[in-house]
Image (cartoon, rainbow, N blue to C red):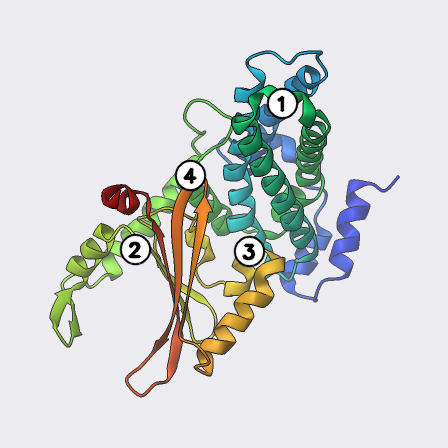
Amino acid sequence: MTTKDELLQSYHENLRPSEATRRAAAMSAPDLENLPEGHPIRGLRAENEAMNTLIERLLEENEFHEPPASFLPAILRLNGVRTHYAKKEEILMPMLYRYGVTGPSDVMWREDDEIKKELGVLTQTLKEEPDNILLYRGRIRGLLQHMQAMTKKEDLILFPLCLRYFNDDEWYAVYEDAITIGTAFLTGEPEVWELAEAWKAGQAERLRISEIEEGKVRFEGGALTVRELRAILKLVGVDITFIDTDDMLRFFENEGKVFARPKSALGNAVYDCHPPQVVPAVRQLIADFRVKKRDHMTVWRMIAGKPVSVRYHAVYDRDGKYLGTVEFVQDCTDILAHFK
C-alpha cells in the first residue's frame, strides 16, 4: 500500500526545482496532530470531524425503512461544506499554485465541484419532493461517501502539502482570510492564534502609516481624498475585482460578499483563482478584451438561491490601451423585490 510520504514524494518529484520545493521535499512528514491552537489546519480538520459525525448519522438513517423527520434538515445542513471548500479553493489552492503545486489541487477542485453540484441538486429536489426521499437513497449514499472520502484526501494530501510549503507569514494570512470566510459545522467562536493576531495588528499599523489618507485622487468631475474614496466604495454594495494588464489580481472591494475574496489572493494570477475547468473560458474572455473583440460580458446566475449578476468589463485608457479587466458582482434580490 502506498504510504502518505510516498504519495507526497511523488508530487514533489514532478515540481519545478525551487528553494521552496527543496525545503518541502526535505521536511519530515508534517505533524497534523500538534499544531498550535488557532492554526487554520486545526480549524479545517475540526470542521471535517464535525461533518463526518453528521455524515455517519445520515448514512445510518439513510438505510432506515423510513428516515426520521430530522433526516431532511440534516441533509440541508451539509451545504455548510461550501464554506469549508471555499477556504480550500480561495486560499489554500491558489497559494500552492505559487509554488508550482497544481496537480492535487486541480483534481480536488474538480471533485469539490462535483460534490457541490450533486448536493445542490439533491437538496433542491428533496425540498420540493420530501415525500419521495426514499427514491434518492442511492444518490444520497453516494454523495455522503464522496464527501467522506474528500476529508481523507485533505488529511492525506492537501493539508500536509500546505504545511510543507507555506511559511509563517503565509499561514498568518491564511488565518486572517479563513476568519473572513467563516466556519462550517462548528458552534462557538473559532480558536484564536495569538501569533497570527499579533501579525495582523502589525500589518494594520504598517498600512496605517503608509497610507496617504488625505492625498487627492483627481477625476474629470473633481477630486476625492483616499479616505473619502474608500468610504464611498464601501457603500456601493457591489463586489468589485480588478485584474491588471498582466492578468494579476490587484484589487478588490468585497462589500457585497457574494464570493469569497481572501487578501492572500492579491498578487495571484487570475487563472489560479478559478477551477481548472473554467480557466480556458477566462483566458478567452481576457484575450477578447485585449484585442477589443468584445468589451464586456454579463452572466446571470442563481447562487445559493439568490439572483446574482456578474459583469465583466474591459478597462482601457484614453488612448484605447488595455489596462485590465474589472468584475462587478451584485446580489439582485432587493432590486427584484422592489420592482415586484
Q: Position of residue 127 (x, y in %)?
A: 52, 27
When the figure is inspected, residue 302 is found, relative to residue 103, above or below; the finding is above
Instruction: Look at the numbered discs 3 and 2 and tell me whether their residues touch, using CB distance below 8 Å.
Output: no
Task: Tell me the amino acid under the disc marked 4.
Answer: Ile
**Depth check, front residue: 70 or 189:** 70
**Numbered disc in front, either 3 or 2:** 3
The residue identified by callout 4 is 179
Q: Amino acid at mark 1?
A: Asn
Residue furthest out toward the right: 1
Q: Residues within 10 Å of mark 2 (few under 14, many from 20)?
A: few
Mark earlier in primary sequence (3, 2): 3
Q: Residue at x 56, y 66 (%)?
A: 281
Q: Indicate which disc, 1 or 2, sits on the residue closer to the N terminus.
A: 1
Choose the circle earlier in sequence order: 4 or 1.
1
Is label 4 in a helix, a strand or a loop? helix
Marks 4, 1: nearer the viewer: 1
Give the CA separation, mark 4 to mark 3: 17 Å
Circle 2 sits on which residue?
206
Which badge, 2 or 4, is on the more N-terminal residue? 4
Measured in 3D between alpha carbons, the distance from the residue under mark 1 to the one under mark 2, in whole angstroms, is 58 Å
Q: Residue 156's quadrant in the figure?
A: top right
| Marking on residue 94 | 3
Q: Which mark is residue 155?
A: none
| Position in image of residue 289 (x %, y %) | 45, 76
**On the image, which quarter does residue 42 sit in?**
top right
Give the mark nearer the N terminus: 3 vs 1. 3
Query: Which is in the foreground here, disc 2 or disc 4?
Result: 4
Q: Which of the two residues, 234 or 34, is positioned nearer the viewer here?
A: 234
